[in-house]
C-alpha cells in the first residue's frame, strides 16, 4: 500500500500504549490496531485530528506516501 502509517513510531516516542492512545482518542483498541497496521481503507479527519492532538504531532508524522515497488520498477 502506498500510504504507510507510523503510529507505532509516535507511540514509542511518547512512551504511550495502544490502549492509552485509544482511550484518549475515543476509539476502540481494535479500530486503532486496524489503522496502525495499515489495514484501514480510510480515516476520518476528526480521528486524525484527535490522534495528532493526543500525540502532539502533525498528520505527516503519522502518515507518509511510499511508491509502490511494482510502479518504481516500471
Image (tube, helix red, strand yellow):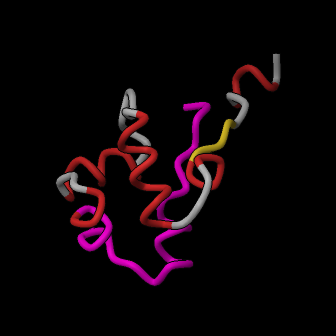
Q: Is residue 5 above or below residue 68?
A: below
The N terminus - image quarter = top right
Q: Tell me where residue 9 appears, x and y as whole percent.
A: 55, 67
Q: Tell me where residue 58 appears, x and y as whole percent.
A: 62, 53
| Residue at the spot 69% in from the left edge and 37% down from the top edge | 66
| Residue at the spot 39% in from the left edge and 79% down from the top edge | 16
Q: Where is residue 45, by image quadrant?
A: top left
| Residue at the spot 82% in from the left edge and 15% down from the top edge | 74
Q: Is residue 9 above or below residue 34?
A: below
Side of 63 where 34 appears, left or right: left
Does residue 7 show up magenta in the picture? yes
Asked whether 13 or 39 is in front, the reply is 13
Q: Tell me where residue 67 appears, x and y as whole percent.
A: 73, 31
Does residue 65 show up magenta in the picture? no
| Residue at the spot 58% in from the left edge and 47% down from the top edge | 59
Q: Is residue 66 above or below residue 60?
A: above
Q: Which residues are the magenta region? A: 1-22
Side of 23 where 42 appears, left or right: right
Q: Is residue 18 above or below residue 27?
A: below
Residue with the most extreme top position: 74
Please give the count of numbered marks on the rendered protein: 0
Asked whether 31 or 24 is in front, the reply is 24
Q: Tell me where residue 33 appears, x and y as whole percent.
A: 30, 54
Asked whether 63 or 50 is in front, the reply is 50
Amino acid at each position: 500500500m502506498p500510504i504507510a502509517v507510523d503510529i507505532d513510531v509516535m507511540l514509542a516516542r511518547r512512551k504511550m500504549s495502544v490502549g492509552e492512545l485509544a482511550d484518549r482518542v475515543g476509539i476502540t483498541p481494535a479500530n486503532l490496531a486496524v489503522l496502525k497496521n495499515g489495514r484501514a481503507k480510510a480515516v476520518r479527519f476528526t480521528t486524525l485530528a484527535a490522534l495528532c492532538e493526543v500525540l502532539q504531532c502533525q498528520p505527516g508524522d503519522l502518515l507518509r506516501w511510499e511508491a509502490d515497488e511494482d510502479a518504481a520498477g516500471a
